[in-house]
Amino acid sequence: MRLSGKVAIVTGSTRGIGEGIARLFCAEGAKVVITGRDKSKGFSLSQELGRKSEYSARGCLFVPGDIRVKEDIIRLKEEALSTFGSIDILVNNAGISMPQALETMTEAAWKGIIDIDLNAVFQCSSVIGQQMIKQKRGVIVNVSSIAAYHPFPGGGAYGAAKAGTIMMTKQYAMEWAKYNIRVNSVSPGLIRTPLTEKIYEDESVTQARIEMIPLRRIGRPEEVAYCVLFFCSEESAYITGQDIIVDGGLTDNVYQGIPGRIASNKS
């Protein structure tokens, strides 16, 4: 088990990619603290994962809260420490995407996305990172997006927040290397989750998206989770300040649709 005995906090972990990360971490021997605003799902998931853990019910703890609220982050940290005694890993996964053109976006809408997708990454890292500094060890992984690399129609504040997350990752990595804290990020592409399921109910949209992706399929939450696991394991002990794109080749396929270029083999 690659995370045996490690204590990990995963934000936004009651569904989707965050849930996939929590499940994989438990399977790899970690004691996992999940958090989110859905109390019913959170307690249910923590009980399920706790039963599967070698640490029994103590293997997974749910702490309800809103990561936009600093007091909730402090409580998350304190409950993790009182239950497990240390914090080895923080995965800043929580985020939202509300597509809207900048020309019609209100200040309130902009702030709503920035508060969760960027400011909360800073707040969680700063509060929970203090324990890692005290321990002189730790790993932080931030979940960004391929939207950090290219604008898309209606991207609004989302891409800006995710681009900021990658730069924040690099900044923390540089500043906290002296404390033996590694900080990296993962940028998912098109991943099928409960939040995106409505999109994929339209078969024509699903097929059009698949045709854009060189690997010819939509990604799964566990495929992002395995990349996060790599960054949190000793296998990446000499890697910090990096971002890995998990998108089936979509980002590098951006020029394939330009007229006049030689088309790639789509067979």
Image (tube, rainbow, N blue to C red):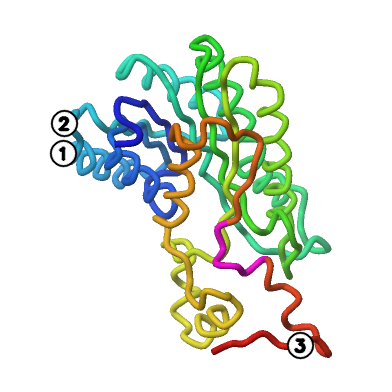
Please report the bounds of the magenta region as a residue range: 246-251
What kind of residue is marked 2?
Ser
> Mark 1 = which residue?
51
> Mark 3 = which residue?
262
Q: Are marks 3 and 2 in contact (CB under 8 Å)?
A: no
189 in relation to 41, above or below: below
Judge whether residue 2 is colored magenta. no
* Residue pictured at 72% horizontal, 48% vertical: 163
What kind of residue is marked 3?
Ile
In the picture provided, is 161 more to the left or to the right than 201?
right
Relative image position of residue 222 (x, y in whole percent): 39, 55
First along the sequence among labels 2 and 1: 1
Alpha carbon separation for disc pair 3 and 1: 54 Å
Q: What element carries label 3?
A: loop
Residue 128 or 88: which is nearer the viewer?
88
Q: Residue furthest top?
A: 134
In the picture provided, is 1 more to the left or to the right than 171?
left
* Residue pictured at 73% horizontal, 39% vertical: 167
> Mark 2 = which residue?
56
Q: Do the residues labelled 2 and 1 touch (CB within 8 Å)?
A: yes
Q: Which mark is residue 167?
A: none
